[in-house]
Amino acid sequence: FMEKAIEGNPRAESVHITDLFAEIAGISFDAAADRKPDYRVKPSEAVWASGAYPRNQLKRACIQVGASARIRRYPLGLVGEVSRMLIGRGWEVFLMGAKGELPPKKKDVTSLRNLTDDGLSFRQSCAVLNTADVVIAPDSSLAHVAGALDIPCVALYGPFHWKVRTAYSPSITGIQGNNGCEPCWHHVNQARQDHFPARCPSKAHGFCQVLASIRPERIVALAEKVVRRGPTRDLGGKLA
């Protein structure tokens, strides 16, 4: 029973979730054991993604725009700045997330695709993600899928420390926000909708000020530094 394995557990502040789940389940393995997440894009899914979202000569960045809790979301205005900077530097940008996470677009923007309106399933989203040269995401699902697929990922962290969350995913490089109150390790109770700690200054603003301290130019510089180079992926989502 893994409920509350992380939420309210002080060991989750220093122990990776993989090790913590194993510890609770009574599973032991030696220090050299492979703890990297495992996810596979099916060949049929890869063929679908390449047909539905064909590559051009531009580098492709997939950006996850949301997360299940507001405290883990990078502000949308700053997501827009990151997107504009990347496009200006010759990138193609895919905005990914659940339907309705972005407001209706006012006009078409060259090299920008809003996939939140496409109604993609989780597995379809992962197949599209597998076509990217780099992923930019908060502490949420697609960052961890990128880690499992060995896709370079710039992960944005505020309330949790990125190294504890991503230690076994070498392709993920985290940026830790910094405004003096991080990490707070706050977990949201969806029933209470307590998206921020009771005395958190961010509560009045509706977004995490720690995450907001991460400047878009820093994200773009790191994305261009870690961008995938060399061998391309085969249809199974592994290095060819």
Image (tube, rainbow, N blue to C red):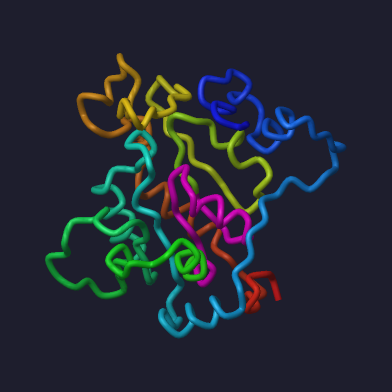
Q: Please tell me whether residue 138 belongs to the stretch shown in magenta.
A: yes
- The front one of 233 and 89 is 233
Q: Is residue 187 magenta?
A: no
Could you tell me residue 227's position as x and y percent? 54, 62
x and y, in percent, of residue 169 in the image: 65, 49
Compared with residue 175, is residue 171 higher up or lower down, i.e. above or below? below
**Where on the picture, by quarter, is residue 115?**
bottom left
Q: Residue at x 43, y 77 (%)?
A: 58
28 relative to 170 in the view: left or right: right
**Number of marks:** 0
The answer to whether residue 4 is above or below residue 32 is above
| Magenta-tinted stretch | 130-154
In this view, which residue lies farthest toward the left?
106
Q: Nearer the viewer, residue 93 or 43?
A: 43
In percent of width and height, residue 123 lies at: 50, 65
User: Which quarter of the figure is the C terminus placed in?
Assistant: bottom right
Q: Nearer the viewer, residue 23 or 56?
A: 23
- Give the residue drawn at x 49%, y 54%: 142
Residue placed at 51% from the left, 70% from the top?
127
- Image side of residue 21 versus residue 88, left or right: right
**Residue at far top of view:** 199
- Picture layout, residue 213 above or below residue 180: below
Q: Is residue 81 left or right of residue 91?
A: left
Q: Assign the N terminus to one quadrant of the image.
A: top right
